[in-house]
Amino acid sequence: MAEKVLMKGNEAIAEAAIIAGCRHYFGYPITPQTEIAAYMAKRMPKIGGTFLQAESEIAAINMVYGVSSTGKRVMTSSSSPGISLKSEGISYLAGCDLPALVVNCQRGGPGLGGIQPSQSDYFQATRGGGHGDYHMIVLAPASVQEMAELTIRGFELADEYRMTAMILADGTIGQMMEPVSFDFAIKEAPEKPWAVTGTKMERAHNIINSLYLVPDVLEQKNFERYEKYAKVAENVALAEEYLMDDAEIVIAAFGIAARVAKNAVNAARAEGIKAGLIRPITLWPFPEKAFKKALGTAKQFISVELSMGQMIEDVRLATECKVPVSLCNRAGGMIPSPEQVYEAIKAAAGKAGK
Amino acid sequence: MTREMLFAGFGGQGLLFSGKVVAYKGLIEDKNVSWLPSYGPEMRGGTANCSVIVSDDPVGAPIISNPDILVAMNLPSLDKYESEVKKGGIIFVDSSLIERKVTRDDIDVYYIPATRLAEENGAPTLANMILVGKLLKVIGEYDEEHVQKALGKCISARHADLLSLNLKCMEIGRDYE
Amino acid sequence: MVVFDRPHALVDIPLHYCPGCTHGIVHRLVAEAIDELGIEGRTIGVAPVGCAVMAYDYFGCDMIEAAHGRAPAVATGVKRSDPDNYIVFTYQGDGDLASIGTAETVHAAARNENITIIFINNAIYGMTGGQMAPTSLPGQVTQTSPYGRDVKACGYPVKICEMLSMLEGPEYLERVAVNNVKNVNKAKKAIKKAFQNQIEGKGFSLVEVISACPTNWGMTPSAALKWIDDKMIPYYPLGVYKDRSAGIIPGAKEEA
């Protein structure tokens, strides 16, 4: 096994991308994700890759669109306000079924917001963000090791399903250092006969395009895309289940919130409260099965979020509102403390006991 | 065993670096570790801190509400975090920079004139490492070999002179009574 | 003997352009240049949003349709993907290049990105039905300037070649027109040079083509060609604005 190194989450993403064969990075500075750009600026020239600081997030995502059109692995990264700008380009990537990796190291919003960690781009990430009917595969790392693992997985899934994969991280996971090992087996990128690589005068021209002026043709395109999304939902959805065998109070939390929640679940178990945690690793597709299974023992769900409550809607949908779902949250760059989550569990257990 | 440590002071005092050395030492000893900085515009000149957790168990939240150990390198940090330290915890105070005493009596306190000692030893920017040396000694974790290895991970080979100066400062801290 | 045939790089399908529109002429000139330079098999074109949106169907090389204004950024990505092999061009109108995509245009030029840009300036938004363009002339009547472009309210036209010529980055900037045979021949030379520059690795080459839009100008095709001579060319003088390899460097001249 490769030696573990201590690394920031953002740097782990960058190194993992290089291991995954990504040789093109386009970005624009924004806190708290700039370490990714800085790492790429240092490394790419030494391995024959391209690092380019674009004139804007809009330009960066369109450069990604250009490289992806030629069939190569490519990525960009930003933080919340920058992702809003990239959303136009992400919609076009979806409309052309182009693979790409986009990192959102979230900060508080709306507007310019702040620079402290947040999870308030959940709706934007899981519902699409830009215009039109589409989805991204949204991966939510909760450790520096997962920042690396899910980056590699993201490139693989993007290629396999010809979709944008988004790493939905936050300022904490991006900035923190933890031991990480880069001992990965990489799946080779599949053949991409659709790519524009020059006809070499041997074939008809390939066209990368999202324009379909005839509505029933465009409708058919959307139908086909949603058939693909159904397969993704079936094959890709993933969650970590922690102490869920007999859990009566079930925490739903992803990313940094799940780390905090785990402390609280442990504290509650020490007090004899049957608490458990479902940590979605894919936010789209949402791991509904884990939640349906939990209904066997669950008396209440608590969604722990760094937002005003966004994933809670998916928890309610997945559980069909069969038991109460409450929110335990902080917003604007604040993080719930383990004590706050523990109190929420205790209150829920008290109610459930009555 | 889980130790939650908070290193706090002004930006530029090297607190993030000293936290990294402690975290790397933990990694070398096969412990679970996390290192979380405060980040943003306050990084230069304002208050900076970093939270380090070294544990035998997987680290949950990397955020520390109540540290076992506080290293305070300026008065605002001591004012802000003194009351947060766990009962029975330890505070290391740079007494060259902080004149007041700790008011609590349910914790151990070590006063080290780290900045003065650093200046006297020709390493005016390494007061942080003197404090780290003392910290590791007090908690019985000053392992010569692991400390050297950890420093080696945090300082690139090109700066070998810096490495020996850092080590010297850690030893000054270790031996300060 | 065939004396006038369809260029190979132009696909044999009907174009959708209006009668009297000069897009067809410029498409042909681009295709001829690609043919003559023998680069079709490694050329990748980027189409805009605007009347030329469906250019991806017309050019025989591999093609990409870009979001409105973003073609230079997309072209940058493509070029960087395989700089020694790909020949990359964008084909953009005035709304696309000089309004919504100004930043992408300026910065691709500033980087001396080794790409070729064909810029169609017909002083109007064609596809959306004749609104004021960034290049519409002062006083020009359009759907969104029904009393004539009022420069007090909406400012002055953007002169792309003049503006970009002040940058150190770009290699070659020329403005041409396609309203008579003589001008078409000059346009052909400029377009071919803009591709040749890329092959030789010289860098960013942009050819601004003053074009006619009889439909939205509300004129007959012949009146539109005359309007180019009478109104457009006096405001947008033709000629080479920058050619670094030939020593035509406006910024440097002023310093000297």
Image (tube, coloured by chain):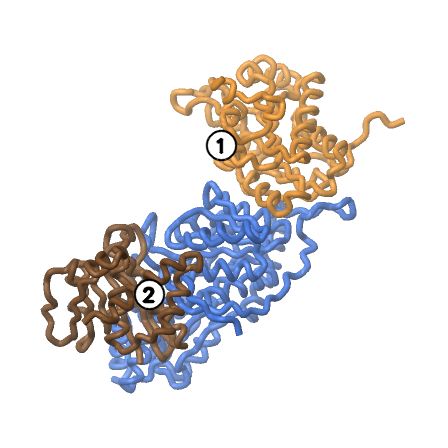
Callout 1: SS: helix
In the picture provided, is C200 more to the left or to the right than A265? right
Q: Amino acid at mark 1?
A: Ser
Chain rendered brown: B
* Camera sees residue A334: no
Judging from the image, mark 1 belongs to the subunit labelled: C
Q: Amino acid at mark 2?
A: Leu
Q: What residue is pinned by disc 1?
A: C99
Q: Colour of chain C?
A: orange
How many badges with numbers are in the image? 2
Q: What residue is pinned by disc 2?
A: B167
Callout 2: SS: helix
In the image, is residue B22 above or below residue C66? below
Give the spatial CA distance, label 2 vs label 1. 60 Å
Q: Residue at x 41, y 52 (%)?
A: A34
Q: Which is more toward the observer, C227 or A82?
A: A82
